Image (spheres, grey):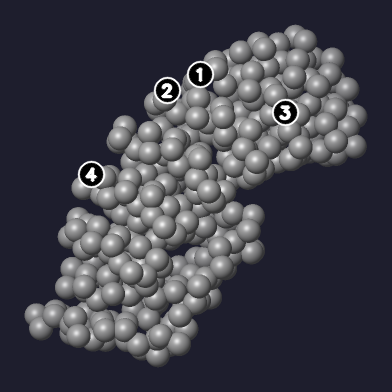
Amino acid sequence: MSVISLLAPLLVFCCLGFAFDEPHTLNSSVGMTTNLAAQDVATDAAPDVKTEIQRLSSPSPRERAEAACALGERRATEAVPALIRTLGDDAPVDQPVCGQKGNWGDNKVNKTSPGEVAAVALSRIGREAVAPLIGALESQSWQARANAAFALGLVRDERSIDPLIAATRDSEWHVREKAAWSLGLTGDRRAVEPLATALKDADWHVRAQSAWALGLKGDDRAVEPLVLALSDENAHVQSQAAWALGLKGDERAVEPLTVALRAEGEHVRSQAAWALGLKGDARAVEPLISALKDSSADVRSQAAWALGLKGDSRAIEPLKIALNDSDEDVRRQAAWALQLRGLKSGRGLRVGMPEINVNVEPRVKMEFK
């Protein structure tokens, strides 16, 4: 469990840059560049805040995004109404915005929008923005509802739990997905059952995001729904369920994960091997040894890493054979696994810190820092 306790917070805060394999397409409203932000300029606002609020009505999407970012940096409560109006602005804008690094997890997703930046700005303003954001969950614009759900996850205010649970039943999958993500960041037990229900959503993006969210829940009720998700028709959902089960110290997950080692998708098999590495259960050893012969080098490498954590003598000879694998990463992981047992690899490899190929994808499109 010490490995899990070290990994869990890291996975929440450092892995947010990972993306879906198929990035979301912006339903762009490029022609609707003029919003009503100028009407919301507070008379008592500082001059620089007034200027940024007025820039939210710029014909340039980049200027609107930069203005939203600047207002968030200032934590300008006077700008909350104008930023709420901006949540539905989904005109595409290239990263980086306002000096931020575009940390996206891969090169497929490299755009944001004024609405997304406004969501982050509102989250930085904090509690004063929560009630308006909850109200925005009722907007006619699904883009505004999705960005409001995203922002509420960043704020993490208890008032948002029930509205976010309701948003998991929204008519638009983008909103349901963001609501599931935000519920994943809360420690509230009320979120577990709605997220388990969302594992049956009609859209795979929502199901995958719900699996990710349940992985962060220290609640035994999440195990059985996640086990069932290993048999989902979509490989992305299967993979995310395997990742989530890896964080669960529950023996019920072991046998289903060994079955997942034979799944059709190689990424599912790799995630299952990773998850089994965190299980202190001897039943995982033989299936992981078999996985050292998988057709995918990524799976073989992950299996070698997992066997390194097992400390089981049955793995010694198979790991020695893996030292001759055609893939360099597999050879390195096998050497590291053997060194954990105080055994020499016999190949002169100098292995320091373990190269843990965790391969986690928490299914979140973007990161703002």
Identify residue type, mark 3: Leu
Mark carried by residue 158: 4
Residue that appears at 83% across and 31% down: 294
Horizontal and vertical percent position of residue 58: 36, 88
Q: CA distance from mark 2 to mark 1?
A: 8 Å
Mark carried by residue 261: 3
Identify residue type, mark 4: Glu
Q: CA distance from mark 3 to mark 4?
A: 39 Å
Against 58, residue 157 (above or below) is above
Badge 2 or badge 4: first in the primary sequence? 4
Asked if residue 240 lies left or right of residue 300, the reply is: left
Residue that appears at 43% across and 38% down: 197
Identify residue type, mark 2: Asp
Q: Quadrant of the C terminus?
A: bottom left
Badge 3 or badge 2: first in the primary sequence? 2
Residue 340 in view, yes or no: no
Identify the residue under disc 2. Answer: 220
Are the residues tagged 2 and 1 within 8 Å (C-beta)? yes
Identify residue type, mark 1: Asp
Q: CA distance from mark 3 to mark 2?
A: 23 Å
Q: CA distance from mark 2 to mark 4?
A: 22 Å
